[in-house]
Amino acid sequence: MRVLLALTVAALTAVGVAEPAPRELTLSVAVSLKEAVEELGRRFVPAHAGVTLRYNFGASGELARQIEAGAPIDLFLSAGERQMDDLERHGLVVRATRRVLARNVLVAVKPVDSRLDLAKPADLLDARVGRVVVGNPKTVPAGQYAEQSLRVLGLWGPLGPRLIFAENVRQALEYVARGEVDVGFVYASDLASRPGRVREAFRPGEDTYSPIVYPAAVVTGAHEPALAEAFIGLLRSAEGQAVLARFGFQPAVR
């Protein structure tokens, strides 16, 4: 009897301490959010036993294309509403889960040791300005905002021969940081991520481009929809907004 009781207790104990089945949450994330999302991910995992996070960073347009092609993604965090709108229109994200998680502004930056005096957009026409980098407007929201602004300012055409296109906003930032270009258009949050390597030249008027809004939504058919919604909740919480602010983002709600 004692042996049977001991075995029963051991079995119950084993059941009681059994680890939860492992789960994986896959996030496609606009690369400008990289550091902030990774930090929040480190806070998210301890509160969700058995969960691991798998990140897919890149340009929002390219990430949206992957979702359209059937990539197994749970959560999409975009740097532009256009990409999220397209997915929602095709039923590829769950409309009821869509939330704004942050905002941003456009900034023109130059290498930290640059001697060019660039105080306003018109200064880009200075003959001493060589190459200007923007994200590829076909897939990169930062490039789309930059094109909007430069067109409104009447500079897109004149600057055409000097423009080079980056695959994402962080690549544009790196071109500037390495001194491979004279000026680049990035987000204010990107500027904050490279202290000592780039510096602000000027900020185009916010009335020259669409509001920079970062939407998040659960992808239709997600394997872990509840976890994806929980991560959105963390992003929008006071804790999440404080982390995003520290990385140079503006609040989700103005």
Image (cartoon, rainbow, N blue to C red):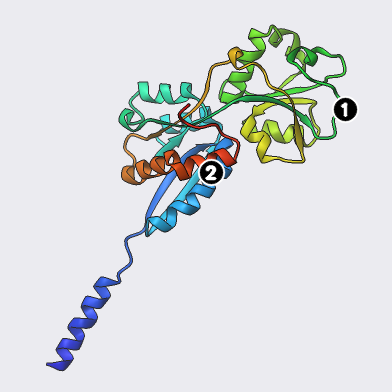
What amino acid is found at the position of numbered circle 2 in the picture?
Answer: Val
The residue at the point 80 percent across, 15 percent down is: 123
| Near-viewer residue (193 or 165) | 193
CB under 8 Å between callouts 2 and 1? no
Q: Which residue is mark 1?
A: 115
Q: With 114 as the anchor, is 216 left or right in this view?
A: left
Q: With 14 as the anchor, is 187 left or right in this view?
A: right
Tell me the crowding category of disc 1: few under 14, some 14 to 19, or many 20 or more residues within 10 angstroms, Cα based: few
105 is higher (above) or lower (below) than 197: above
Residue 44 x, y percent position in the rendering: 44, 51
Residue 160 x, y percent position in the rendering: 73, 13
Taking the image as drawn, is residue 72 in sight? no
Tell me the crowding category of disc 2: few under 14, some 14 to 19, or many 20 or more residues within 10 angstroms, Cα based: some
Taking the image as drawn, is residue 145 in sight? yes
Q: Which residue is mark 2?
A: 243
What amino acid is found at the position of numbered circle 1 in the picture?
Answer: Arg
Q: SS class of the residue under badge 2?
A: helix
In the drawing, what numbered circle is on residue 98?
Answer: none
Residue 76 x, y percent position in the rendering: 44, 35
The residue at the point 68 percent across, 34 percent down is: 191
| Near-viewer residue (77 or 233) | 233
Quadrant of the rendered image containing residue 46: bottom left
Quadrant of the rendered image containing residue 8: bottom left
The residue at the point 53 percent across, 20 percent down is: 211
2 or 1: mark nearer the eye: 2
